[in-house]
Amino acid sequence: MSLDADTIRRIATLARIRVAEDEVATLQGELNGILAWIEQLNAVDTDGIAPLTGAAHMALKMREDVVSDGNIRDKVLANAPERIGPDEAFFAVPKVVE
């Protein structure tokens, strides 16, 4: 299968990609190269070969769903330019609502 310049312009329009007229020939060569690779893959005989299994058939490892603070309060607060509250355990932020 080979794509002509008009088909390239149509594909670009459908994909909502602006393609300048001088880029059409380059894009045509690239897309025709991709289609040539696909045609080569279609020519491979895969009879008798079992399909590969994907991750969709694997069971996910489950963990207990618990709420925690991550136990890294001091690391998080190290990024604060200013702290407030008891033990300086909170970020100080400017007032945004009056």
Image (cartoon, helix red, strand yellow):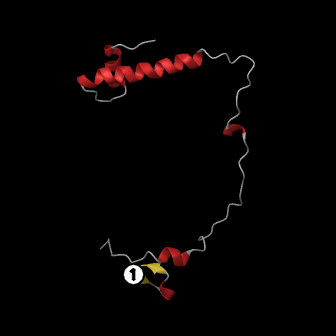
The C terminus lies in quadrant: bottom left
Count of picture labels: 1
Q: Quadrant of residue 40?
A: top right
Give the x, y percent position of residue 77: 48, 77
Q: Is residue 89 left or right of 20 when viewed as pictured?
A: right
Disc 1 designates what residue? 82
Which residue is painted at 73% across and 45% down in the image? 59
Nearer-the-camera pick, 14 or 33: 33
Mark 1 neighbour class, 10 Å CA radius: few under 14, some 14 to 19, many 20 or more = few
Residue 95, compared with residue 23, is above or below; it is below
Q: Residue furthest bottom?
A: 87
Disc 1 marks a residue whose amino acid type is: Glu
Nearer-the-camera pick, 96 or 72: 72
Q: Considering the numbered disc 1 on the image, is that residue within a helix, a strand or a loop?
A: loop
Nearer-the-camera pick, 10 or 5: 5
Give the x, y percent position of residue 21: 24, 22
Residue 75, compared with residue 34, is above or below; it is below
Which residue is painted at 33% across and 75% down in the image? 95
Q: Is residue 1 left or right of 11 when viewed as pictured?
A: right
Q: Residue furthest left?
A: 21
Residue 37, compared with residue 87, is above or below; it is above
Nearer-the-camera pick, 25 or 17: 25
Which residue is painted at 42% across and 76% down in the image? 80
Which residue is painted at 67% across and 38% down in the image? 56
